[in-house]
Amino acid sequence: MNKIAISLIVLAALVVAGGYWYVSSLPALEPQPEVDGASRRTTQSGDVVGFIAQSGARAWLGVRFARPPVGQRRWQAPEPPPPAGELIEALEFGAACPQLHSQLTSSGDMPEPGRMVGDEDCLYLNIWSPPNASGLPVMLWIHGGGNTIGHGGNVVGANLAAARQVVVVSINYRLGLFGWFNHPALASGDPADDSGNYGTLDMIRALEWTRDNIAVFGGDPGNVTVFGESAGAFDTLAMIASPLAKGLFHRAVVQSGGYGVADVAQGQAHEEDGGHPNSAREITSALLIADGLAADAAAARALQESWPLTKLVEYLHGKTPAELYAVLDGGAFGMVDLPANFMDGHVLPAVPAAEVFSVAENHNQVPVILGTNRDEPTLFMSRDPRYVDNRFGLFYSLKDEAAYKRQVRYGARAWKARGVDELAQHMVASGNPNVYAYRWDWDEEPSVLGYDLSVALGAGHALEIPFVFGDFSGGLGLDYIFPNDENQRRLSESMMSYWTEFAYNGAPGRGRDGAEVAWLPWGQDGKTSILLDTPTDGGIRMDDETVTYASIKAELIADASFTGAQERCELYVRIFRFSDLFDADEYADIGCAAYPPENVSWF
């Protein structure tokens, strides 16, 4: 077999392996960028100098926006950075925040489960700006990764900045046990420090830095759009909800998000008292057991309660990132199940989502775009052995294509209901006339070794990101997933046009050039969402569908396509288990008595 054939097979394996490929690694930059003397700027962080990207945009990477959150500042609100005493060459992304190794932070190597990467000194941002920019809209990107993995360098904003005349910023923020950890022993009396919302506060600090410094990079501090995907979209909604972010941004784009928050008690209490399985007290107990200081959970709890607070704080601060994460399982993606975005009443309102977003006084009412992808769950299902057969680690096939498509459909509709339609209705009810929604439908991937990725992945989670940034050249050469044809180019151009017109004027309208299909606000002329697809596959058009959990339930119960009870029952549990729509009597009546809800996996 020749080298080209071997390379294609290896590449194909990477494409379908684990769903990692879409955010494979830190995107490749031009080799050894050269300092551009004309890019010297004076900021709070000191004087910085960047380089000229291949697109012609000016780039400054790894610019510090906060004091390093190390030592005694580990679990405290971020502070402004001290000015550097010398010129900073901002030519490389700053360190990722501590996290388990995954494709989101690798350098092209495959993930090693359990390995730690990153550094606690990680609060850096990146800037891309067109040449000779002045007073341009700013688009600040919050990366995804379950709030436990990822890096601001997972995207490159050079193409978007140069092609559409905006200033693009991407940020790091503390993740996982460093971003959201609220052990009561750490309480100081300062509401920000005691909130446990350190990652959320890092985002607000980045917005403050942007307000104070972005003008020297050609940006308008009075016109900032926050946008993010997945966890970054959840965090974008947290910015809308946080009173501390008021006035720091002026539009928001929520890509595949939802408003996910946790009660303070979930983050603090032992599990037997209603806390999360990985609450701060449970993590501390696991550490004590791992260190041989307690024999079991009961002994660890008793020891925690017996130690003076100063001793417990010293113990927690003395742990390295690797020691903290050694008691957690990140699974295949490196993501850890941890509570985040606490409803503490200071950083985030201590009220439910409906009350936050349906009352104008309870959130930062700005123009907003809400969207999901038609096939969100496929990223997580496309090599799951429950749905997919695999031979030799290379040759994949769906076990039951019809069942796979049903699982995807219902999962994606539930995501749309939570992350788009119900939120849009709340926001419109609050009096916001500038609420826009989309569904992204692109599904034109190739088949790889007989595995049809247009079905297996389709319009899966996160695949829209390259279209928004106009950049399909991610690491590992996995741009192979995209055909790079005229359809792809035109859809990307349309999306960049809509996103940047929204950044300019608070409404996507007909895009920057005025030639796109009119994107109407939610409810105008009976329309709700715009469907984003290629010209040969339905094109871009407005739609009138509204999906709610109640409508999904009615559809699920009436669906005659199921060949057995178990699949319907598992979907019922996955979609409704944590909502007031879960009805035990109804569950039994539809033939599910033999499938106890507690035995159904989360996904």
Image (tube, grey):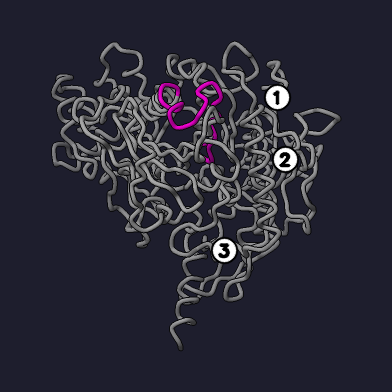
Mark nearer the N terminus (1 vs 3)? 1
* Residue at 36% from the left image edge and 58% from the top image edge: 31
Q: SS for tag 3?
A: helix
Q: Mark 1 or mark 2: which is in front?
A: 2
Magenta-tinted stretch: 211-232
Find disc 2 in the rendering and name its residue.
Answer: 513
Mark nearer the N terminus (2 vs 3)? 3
Q: Position of residue 55 (x, y in %)?
A: 51, 51
How dense is the environment of label 2, judged by Cα within 10 Å: few (below 14), some, or many (20 and up)?
Answer: few
* Front residue (pair 69, 490): 490
Q: Is residue 217 above or below residue 481?
A: above
Residue 346: assigned label: none
Q: Amino acid at mark 1?
A: Asn
Q: Amino acid at mark 3?
A: Ile
Mark nearer the N terminus (1 vs 2)? 1
Mark pair 2, 3: CA separation: 29 Å
Find disc 1 in the rendering and name its residue.
Answer: 434
Q: Outermost residue toward the right? A: 525
Residue 283 location, quadrant: top left
* Front residue (pair 174, 160): 160
Find disc 3 in the rendering and name its residue.
Answer: 481
* Front residue (pair 14, 335): 14
